[in-house]
Image (spheres, helix red, strand yellow):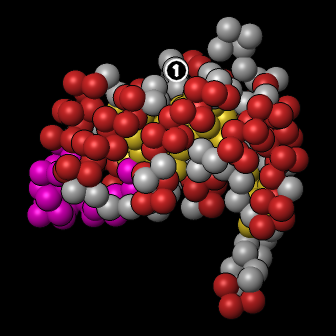
Amino acid sequence: MRIGFRSDGSVKHLELAKRVGLPVIELGWTPEIRVELDDIERRLKDFGIGVSAILTGEHHDLDGLKFALDWTRRLGAFAFVTHPEPIALHDTEKAREFAALFAPAADHAAKLGVSLAVHSCGLGPEPWDVMFAAVPALTLKYDPSFSLEAGRNYRGEIIKYCPRIVHVHVKDEMLLGRETDFSNGIMRYQYVPAGMGDIHWGSVIALLLEGGYRGDLAIETHSSFWWEHVEWDLALCKRHLEQFIPPTG
């Protein structure tokens, strides 16, 4: 279980990974990054940094997904993480459309020996179950912060879905006991480095290990303050997480 962080594959980010001692990155998948893929591949080799997973917030057609999965394999990553919209429990038409796109993409991933995963952001157990029923080969990128925000039991979700979890995001948060007011920039929670918020990362990692998880952890810096001090964020997260990872993990 290696620790990395969400990255654009730039020289700046790879230098940061080396300074902090992070052996992998989670590579974003955007038009800007795609035009640099050959250069990014060379930089990764030069720096000796691996790729744990590739993640996108975009919507793709089948050719786009296959291209992304080909690069997932080429860069040695475990999974390509996509961000589909939720599907309601009885929306059979949308489930059929989802399967028509993602079933052949998941087959292509299997042939390459990588995983096609759905993002937990904006989703939850009901749409996960619909998607997994529609495309049984799909896997899951899990982020306990979304479950905490929604008032769900992230420990119970890890126990239930661990056989499908292939990638994990790390961002912690403090629940502040106030209502969100977007117009004034007030949120009911505040993002902080792992170990400074309300998520118990020891129990998260223990349940992942017990569930047979073989993926990595990707730190996702998620506030303006910590982006200004991203090296602090990565170093503090790494220090906290490492105490829970077995030496051979």
Residue 99 appears in the rendering: yes
User: What residue does disc 1 label?
Assistant: 214
The image quarter containing residue 52 is top right
Queried whether the magenta region covers residue 226, the answer comes back as: no
Quadrant containing the N terminus in the rendered view: top right
Q: How many tags in the picture?
A: 1
Picture coordinates of residue 106, whole percent (x, y): 23, 37
Q: State the residue in front, 95 or 152.
A: 95
Span highlighted in magenta in the image: 82-103
Q: Residue lying farthest top? A: 248
Residue 195 appears in the rendering: no
The amino acid marked with disc number 1 is: Arg
Mark 1 Cα shell of 10 Å, populated few (<14), some (14-19), many (≥20): some
Queried whether the magenta region covers residue 84, the answer comes back as: yes
- Horizontal relation, residue 219 to residue 66: left or right: right
The secondary element bearing badge 1 is classed as loop
